[in-house]
């Protein structure tokens, strides 16, 4: 019977140990949570930001009044996400966003028309103001105080005084040209 040397036995033991450890790894569904927070607690997988539809805010919707023509409503709110050939007097404005680190948002605004004029605008109660919307999707959280944007009077007094120009500014010299008028004078 042939014996296996110790140098050949070590790689076999190491390989069997590694393969045995694979059975104790969590399944792929356990690696990330439903929100995709962290994989194995170490890295965050990349998630594509999906933005669909028209961003409508309280300020924007307040500009739309009943009796406006369709073209003016389209100019203010944008093209509707859904128009139906069977319900041509109804426009649906749908907005969804899924951003990593922020709660997903879904909103729906319905514009109803009579002929060419806006009859009513059905707006959800949770429609945010513009600043609230930006704050809800902002995932950048600055640390520390923000930059100082203005100087105090004492700091302004410490600034060096700009030097005055010692030589007068000369007007440019060169050929003087005159051009005929583009339109005949009447």
Image (cartoon, rainbow, N blue to C red):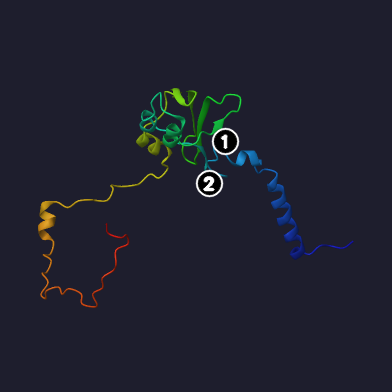
- Taking the spot 26% from the left edge, 70% from the top edge, the residue there is 178
Q: Which x, y percent locates residue 131?
A: 35, 36
Q: Residue furthest toward the front?
A: 186
- Residue, disc 2: 44
- Residue, disc 1: 34
**In this rendering, position of residue 18 left or right of residue 67:** right
The foreground one among 25 and 30 is 30
Helix, strand or loop status at disc 1: loop
**In this rendering, position of residue 156 left or right of residue 4:** left
Quarter where residue 75 is shown: top left
Mark 2: give few (<14), some (14-19) or many (20+) Cα within 10 Å: few
Q: Which x, y percent locates residue 165?
A: 12, 72
Mark 1: give few (<14), some (14-19) or many (20+) Cα within 10 Å: few
- Taking the spot 41% from the left edge, 27% from the top edge, the residue there is 68
The foreground one among 56 and 145 is 56
Helix, strand or loop status at disc 2: loop
Q: Which x, y percent locates residue 167?
A: 11, 76
């Amino acid at each position: 019977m042939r014996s296996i040397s110790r140098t050949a036995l070590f790689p076999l033991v190491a390989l069997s140990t590694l393969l045995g450890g694979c059975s104790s790894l969590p399944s792929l569904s356990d690696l990330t949570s439903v929100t995709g927070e962290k994989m194995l607690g170490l890295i965050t997988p990349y998630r594509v930001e999906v933005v669909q539809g028209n961003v409508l805010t309280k300020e924007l919707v307040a500009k739309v009044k009943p009796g406006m023509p369709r073209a003016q409503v389209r100019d203010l709110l944008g093209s509707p996400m859904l128009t139906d050939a069977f319900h041509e007097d109804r426009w649906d404005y749908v907005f969804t966003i899924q951003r990593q680190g922020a709660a997903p948002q879904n909103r729906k605004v319905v514009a109803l028309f009579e002929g060419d004029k806006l009859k009513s605008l059905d707006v959800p109660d949770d429609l945010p103001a513009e600043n609230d919307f930006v704050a809800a999707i902002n995932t950048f959280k600055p640390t520390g105080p923000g930059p100082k944007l203005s100087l105090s009077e004492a700091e302004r007094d410490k600034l060096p005084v700009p030097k005055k120009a010692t030589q007068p500014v000369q007007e440019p010299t060169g050929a003087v040209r005159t051009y005929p008028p583009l339109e005949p004078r009447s």
